[in-house]
Image (tube, helix red, strand yellow):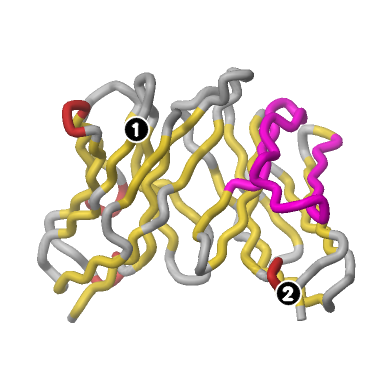
Amino acid sequence: DAGVIQSPRHEVTEMGQEVTLRCKPISGHDYLFWYRQTMMRGLELLIYFNNNVPIDDSGMPEDRFSAKMPNASFSTLKIQPSEPRDSAVYFCASRSGGSDTEAFFGQGTRLTVV
Amino acid sequence: AQSVTQLDSHVSVSEGTPVLLRCNYSSSYSPSLFWYVQHPNKGLQLLLKYTSAATLVKGINGFEAEFKKSETSFHLTKPSAHMSDAAEYFCVVTRRPSYSSASKIIFGSGTRLSIRP
C-alpha cells in the first residue's frame, strides 16, 4: 500500500477563497483523522471518522471548516472562506481497528493563505 | 478522560549521551500509549507503542519507553544520541468519548530534541 495520500502537498491561496484538502486513507482502515499543526498550537485534532461517520468534530475551529467522507477511500477538508490564520500544515491519518493500533500519517498539506 | 503531558518543550543533549523525553498521562482505564517522531518538514512516524503487554517497549532507532502505572509515566529513552535523532517527539494517548466506542488519538504538545556535536 502507498500509505496515506494527501493532496495537494502545498497550497497557496488568497484570503476569501475556498480551499479543499484531500485525503486517501490506507485501504481497509476504518478510522480517519484530520489534524492541523501550527507553531502556536502544535497538533490539534480537528475531526475524526469511524466507518465514514463523523464521531467528534469538536476540534473544528468554526463554521468555515467542514469535512466529509463520502466513502471509505476518500475524505475532504474544506475551508470557505479561507483566512490568513488558517495557514498551517494539515495532516490526515488513518487507522485500523481499536485503540491499541497505531495511526499512519500522510505527508501533510502546507496551506498558506495570503 | 484521557490526556497526555510532555514535561519539556525542548531538550538538548550531546551526541553519544543518553536521551530522556518525559511524558505523563492521565487515564480512567488502561491506556494505549505511543511515541511518534517528526523530522523537520516531514510527516509523523511511529517510534513505539504500549498496549498492556510488556511494560518496557522497544522501538525503532534504538529508542525504548517504560510504562509505569504507579507514576502514570511513559518516558522515552535512548542510551546514546545520534545527530539524526534531532526531531520533534510526540507522546500520544488514545481517548474514547463517552457516547461512542470509537477512540480518538490525542497528541502531547511535543518535545524538540536537539543534538550537540
Q: Which residue in the structure is indicated by mark 2?
A: A84
- Tell me if residue B47 comes above or below residue B100 in the rendering: below
Whether residue A28 is visible here, answered yes or no, is no
> How many numbered discs sit on the rendered protein?
2
Residue A50 inside the magenta-drawn segment: yes
Does the magenta stretch mainly form a helix, a strand or a loop? strand
Which residue is drawn at the image coordinates 37% and 35% (left, top)? Answer: B33
The C terminus of chain A, quarter of image = bottom right
Please tell me whether mark 1 sits on a helix, a strand or a loop.
Answer: strand
Residue B53 picture location, percent across and down: 28, 22
Amino acid type, residue under disc 1 in the picture: Ser
Chain letter of disc 1? B
Q: Nearer the viewer, residue B9 or B66?
A: B9
Please tell me whether mark 2 sits on a helix, a strand or a loop.
Answer: helix
Q: Residues within 10 Å of mark 1 (few under 14, many from 20)?
A: some
Q: Residues within 10 Å of mark 2 (few under 14, many from 20)?
A: some
Which residue is drawn at the image coordinates 83% and 75% (left, top)? Answer: A15
Whether residue B50 is visible here, answered yes or no, is yes
Chain letter of disc 2? A
- Tell me if residue A23 comes above or below residue B10 in the rendering: above
Residue that extends furthest to the front in the rendered view of this protein: A62
Q: Which residue in the structure is indicated by mark 1?
A: B26
Which residue is drawn at the image coordinates 17% and 70% (left, top)? Answer: B13
Marks 1 & 2, CB-CB < 8 Å contact: no
The magenta segment: A45-70
Residue B48 picture location, percent across and down: 34, 41
Residue A53 picture location, percent across and down: 76, 28
